[in-house]
Image (cartoon, helix red, strand yellow):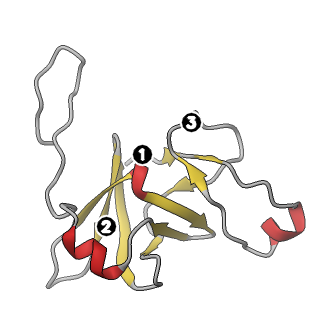
């Protein structure tokens, strides 16, 4: 398993960060040392604070969320990460919006630029 780095655009002061304040992220920028990362074991929540499950893996442009025994895994693109807090990831969607997204389908990705799309 790999961790996926995401560069923070948060400009809060050190005291706010120490208290576990919200860290908005910009997934489109290169990571810098000390920035937050999505890691296995982090809880995943919607904008309206509904728990989706726990990060089980990070791969390429998305991370996998285990929802439990009776619900399918979710494959959430890093571009849909809204905030990272200590041990917690917030996605940029409400509970109702999650139901409409195609996050239950594992994304195709390329192993090599010249290779065709494959399922991991």
| Of callouts 2 and 1, the N-terminal one | 1
Answer few, some or many: residues within 10 Å of disc 1's Cα (few below 14, many 20 plus, some between 14 and 19).
Answer: few
Q: CA distance from mark 2 to mark 1?
A: 14 Å
Of the residues tagged 2 and 1, which is closer to the observer? 2
Of the residues tagged 3 and 1, which is closer to the observer? 3
Foreground residue among 71 and 25: 25
* Secondary structure found at label 3: loop
Q: Which dot marks residue 108?
A: none
Answer few, some or many: residues within 10 Å of disc 2's Cα (few below 14, many 20 plus, some between 14 and 19).
Answer: many
**Left or right side of 66 for 29:** right
Say if 116 sits above or below 5 in the image: above
Answer few, some or many: residues within 10 Å of disc 3's Cα (few below 14, many 20 plus, some between 14 and 19).
Answer: few
- Residue wearing tag 1: 2
**Left or right side of 93 for 106:** left
Q: Pinpoint residue 48: horizontal percent, then vertical percent.
A: 46, 83
Identify the residue at image location x=43%, y=62%: 40
Identify the residue at image location x=51%, y=45%: 27
Which quarter of the rendered picture does the C terminus lie within?
A: top left
Quadrant assignment, res 114 = top left
**Left or right side of 49 for 101:** left
Identify the residue at image location x=44%, y=65%: 92
* Secondary structure found at label 1: loop
Q: CA distance from mark 3 to mark 2?
A: 23 Å
Q: Which dot marks residue 65?
A: 2
Looking at the image, do the residues carrying marks 3 and 1 touch, with CB atoms under 8 Å apart? no
| Of callouts 3 and 1, the N-terminal one | 1
- Residue wearing tag 3: 29
Q: CA distance from mark 3 to mark 1?
A: 18 Å
**Left or right side of 115 for 34:** right
Foreground residue among 1 and 114: 114
Q: Pinpoint residue 83: horizontal percent, then vertical percent.
A: 56, 64
């Amino acid at each position: 398993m790999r961790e996926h780095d995401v560069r923070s655009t948060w400009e809060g002061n050190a005291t706010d960060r120490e208290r576990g304040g919200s860290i908005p992220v910009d997934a489109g920028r290169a990571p810098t040392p000390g920035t937050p990362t999505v890691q296995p074991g982090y809880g995943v929540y919607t904008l309206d604070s509904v728990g989706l499950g726990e990060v089980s893996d990070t791969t390429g442009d998305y991370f996998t969320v285990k929802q439990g025994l009776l619900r399918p895994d979710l494959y959430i693109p890093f571009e849909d990460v809204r905030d990272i807090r200590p041990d917690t990831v917030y996605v940029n969607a409400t509970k109702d919006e999650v139901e409409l997204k195609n996050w239950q389908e594992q994304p195709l990705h390329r192993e090599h630029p010249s290779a065709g799309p494959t399922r991991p």
